[in-house]
Image (cartoon, helix red, strand yellow):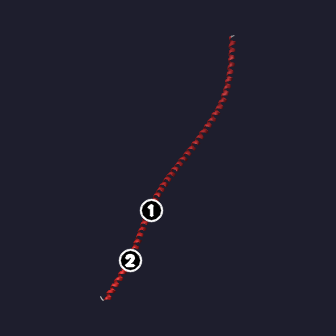
């Protein structure tokens, strides 16, 4: 009887083992299917990551280009500021030149005023000299008339 029970036990164990093997094969098939799906998902994720890396690279290049444009713009702005400073200094120099010219004109105007006053004084002197000259001529004429009369009076008296 022991042999029968042992045989029965072995057959039961073989049946259980076959059932477990079938279950394991089914699990292995499911695992293989999941592994294939996971491999596809991993490949898809890898492609997505590569796409994202490419997008990041392109964005980085865009940012670099934008930075270069900004730097160029800053340099143009600095150059413009320097040009404006030079123009402002030029304007200041021109203003100072104009001020100097205005002062020169003022000095020339004052010189002209002085010359005009001198001319007026000279004209008045000339008028006064003319008046004195006329008075002198009148006195000289009177002198000549008196002298002539004196000479005639002497001549007429026999002296």
Which residue is painted at 41% across and 71% down in the image?
A: 124
Q: Is residue 54 left or right of 92 when viewed as pictured?
A: right
Which residue is painted at 66% across and 32% down in the image?
A: 37
Residue carrying label 2: 135
Q: Residue 116 placed where, x, y %?
A: 43, 68
* Residue 159 location, quadrant: bottom left
Q: Where the N terminus falls, by quadrant?
A: top right
Most distant residue in the left direction = 159
Mark 2 is surrounded, within 10 Å at the Cα level, by few (under 14), some (14 to 19) or many (20 or more) other residues, namely: few
Q: Is residue 70 left or right of 15 when viewed as pictured?
A: left
* Residue 150 location, quadrant: bottom left
Q: Residue 92 placed where, x, y %?
A: 47, 56
Which residue is painted at 56% across and 45% down in the image?
A: 66
Q: Is residue 155 left or right of 116 when viewed as pictured?
A: left
Q: Which mark is residue 106?
A: 1
Q: Residue 19 placed where, x, y %?
A: 69, 21
Rendered position, 108 above or below 90: below
Nearer-the-camera pick, 56 or 124: 124
> What secondary structure is found at the residue carrying circle 1?
helix
Rendered position, 97 above or below 123: above
Mark 1 is surrounded, within 10 Å at the Cα level, by few (under 14), some (14 to 19) or many (20 or more) other residues, namely: few
């Amino acid at each position: 009887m022991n042999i029968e029970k042992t045989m029965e036990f072995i057959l039961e164990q073989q049946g259980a083992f076959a059932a477990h093997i079938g279950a394991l094969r089914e699990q292995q098939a499911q695992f293989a299917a999941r592994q294939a799906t996971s491999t596809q998902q991993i490949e898809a994720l890898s492609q997505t990551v590569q796409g994202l890396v490419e997008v990041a690279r392109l964005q980085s290049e865009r940012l670099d280009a934008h930075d270069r444009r900004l730097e160029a713009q800053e340099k143009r702005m600095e150059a413009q500021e320097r040009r404006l400073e030079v123009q402002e200094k030029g304007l200041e120099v021109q203003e100072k030149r104009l001020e100097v010219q205005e002062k020169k004109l003022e000095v020339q105007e004052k010189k002209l005023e002085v010359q005009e006053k001198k001319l007026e004084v000279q004209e008045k002197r000339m008028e006064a000299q003319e008046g004195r000259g006329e008075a002198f001529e009148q006195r000289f004429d009177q002198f000549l008339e008196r002298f002539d009369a004196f000479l005639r009076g002497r001549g007429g008296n026999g002296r």
